[in-house]
């Protein structure tokens, strides 16, 4: 219930203005977002890489409504990739992108061309791109664009969301050699017709999908902070004899950092998803929706001091 309210607020420009102008918002945002510019992204990446982590960077923004904005997002990624390469931070750092920020909502071809330009810049920088997955109305389009991008850039990865009923089948399709798949639970509000609604059903689906990916020939990226799912991931890695070069764990910047370090200490590859940029509102609201404790933390920061 609370989750639905917060996810609805994520789409409200009135709530967005309220949150953005609240006096202590910035302190809360900083916990989950590395900063606003390329320099902030580089600083956070350097710090994480020094701790033995790998990184995927997300230039925040989604639901772009005009081509100029989409081009600006593409250019921001190209600039970032050149800077990461110049700083010697590739291939430890790669990028994650949302096709809706590249024009998917109004021109799929434009989104594809922008994504292709970013994949080319990533290849030149010696690293890879992963396509984030947004709400279920975009899944087919995103997987179609993924297939086209992989023709020239086979290392391009995609995200699959365990809460969608279709995802086991998508995992089977994408479990082949060379395929990079990030498996997450899913962060959007989805109808029962397409998505499991209870946490238990989503977790069971996650395990079924994990089994498909870990027993396949691709490169699974297990994106979760859930202690039970991480333990099952460690078990499957042993069972399927997957070392640190054959799968990885992924977690979000600012969430369970001590667990990220523990896994690095155990010898696993761990990638931190680092968002940066000025358009942090939708991202922050999804993180708050995942965990009421974060909402309390946010509320305290807004009213205290
Ligand atoms: P769950 O939410 O059940 O949390 C399990 C435990 O983790 C909690 O009990 C708590 O201990 C801790 N935890 C989780 N969230 C927390 C938070 N916000 N603050 C503090 N502690 C928290 N989704 C999507 O739809 N499309 C995408 O492309 C991506 N991409 C993506 C990349 C990466 C690297 C990650 C880690 C996640 C995503 N997601 C995503 C988000 C994902 O779908 C999901 O919403 C979150 O990861 C939360 O789900 P968990 O698996 O962590 O479990």
Image: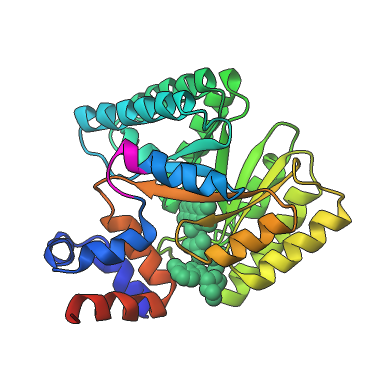
Residue 271 visible: yes
Which image quarter holds the C terminus?
Answer: bottom left
Quadrant of the rendered image containing residue 226: bottom right
Q: Residue at x 33, y 36 (%)?
A: 38
Where in the figure is residue 5, as x and y percent of width and height?
30, 74
Is residue 2 toward the left or the right of residue 116 in the image?
Answer: left
Q: Residue at x 43, y 75 (%)?
A: 291
Using the image as rendered, state which of residue 93 and residue 173 is in the foreground: 93
Residue 98 visible: no
Quadrant of the rendered image containing residue 303: bottom left
Q: Residue at x 64, y 38 (%)?
A: 180
Quadrant of the rendered image containing residue 162: bottom right
Using the image, determine if residue 121 lies above or below residue 182: above
Residue 251 sits inside the magenta stretch: no
Where in the figure is residue 144, as x and y percent of width and height?
52, 32
Q: Residue at x 21, y 66 (%)?
A: 25
Using the image as rendered, state which of residue 45 and residue 74 is in the foreground: 45
| Count of labels in the image | 0
Using the image, determine if residue 176 lies above or below residue 247: above
Which image quarter holds the N terminus?
Answer: bottom left
Q: Which residues are magenta?
A: 35-40
Q: What scheme was used to colour the molecule?
A: rainbow
Is residue 200 toward the left or the right of residue 79 in the image?
Answer: right
Using the image, determine if residue 121 lies above or below residue 175: above
Using the image, determine if residue 113 lies above or below residue 143: above
Where in the figure is residue 61, as x and y percent of width and height?
30, 44
Using the image as rendered, state which of residue 257 and residue 210 is in the foreground: 257
Is residue 202 toward the left or the right of residue 274 in the image?
Answer: right
Where in the figure is residue 50, as x and y percent of width and height?
55, 45
């Amino acid at each position: 219930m609370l989750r639905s309210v917060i996810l609805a607020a994520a789409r409200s420009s009135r709530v967005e203005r309220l949150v953005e102008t609240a006096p202590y918002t910035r302190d809360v945002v900083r916990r989950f977002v590395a900063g606003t510019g390329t320099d902030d992204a580089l600083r956070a990446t350097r710090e994480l890489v020094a701790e033995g982590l790998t990184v995927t960077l997300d230039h925040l923004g989604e639901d772009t409504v005009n081509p100029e904005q989409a081009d600006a997002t593409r250019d921001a990624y190209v600039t970032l990739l050149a800077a990461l390469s110049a700083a010697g931070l590739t291939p430890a750092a790669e990028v994650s992108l949302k096709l809706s920020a590249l024009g998917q909502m109004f021109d799929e071809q434009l989104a594809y061309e922008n994504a292709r330009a970013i994949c080319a810049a990533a290849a030149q920088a010696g690293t890879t791109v992963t396509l984030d997955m947004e709400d279920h109305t975009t899944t087919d389009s995103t997987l179609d664009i993924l297939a086209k991008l992989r023709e020239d850039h086979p290392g391009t990865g995609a995200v699959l969301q365990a809460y969608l009923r279709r995802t086991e089948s998508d995992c089977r399709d994408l479990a082949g050699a060379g395929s990079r798949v990030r498996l997450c639970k899913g962060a959007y509000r989805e109808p029962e017709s397409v998505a499991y609604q209870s946490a238990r059903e989503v977790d069971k689906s996650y395990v079924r999908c994990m089994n498909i990916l870990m027993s396949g020939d691709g490169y699974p990226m297990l994106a979760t902070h859930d202690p039970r799912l991480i333990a099952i991931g460690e078990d499957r890695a042993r069972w399927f004899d997957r070392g640190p070069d054959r799968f990885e764990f992924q977690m979000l910047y600012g969430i369970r950092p001590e667990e990220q370090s523990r896994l690095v200490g155990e010898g696993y590859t761990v990638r931190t998803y680092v968002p940066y940029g000025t358009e942090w509102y939708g991202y922050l609201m999804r993180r708050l929706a995942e965990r009421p404790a974060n909402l309390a933390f946010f509320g305290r920061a807004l009213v205290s001091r």
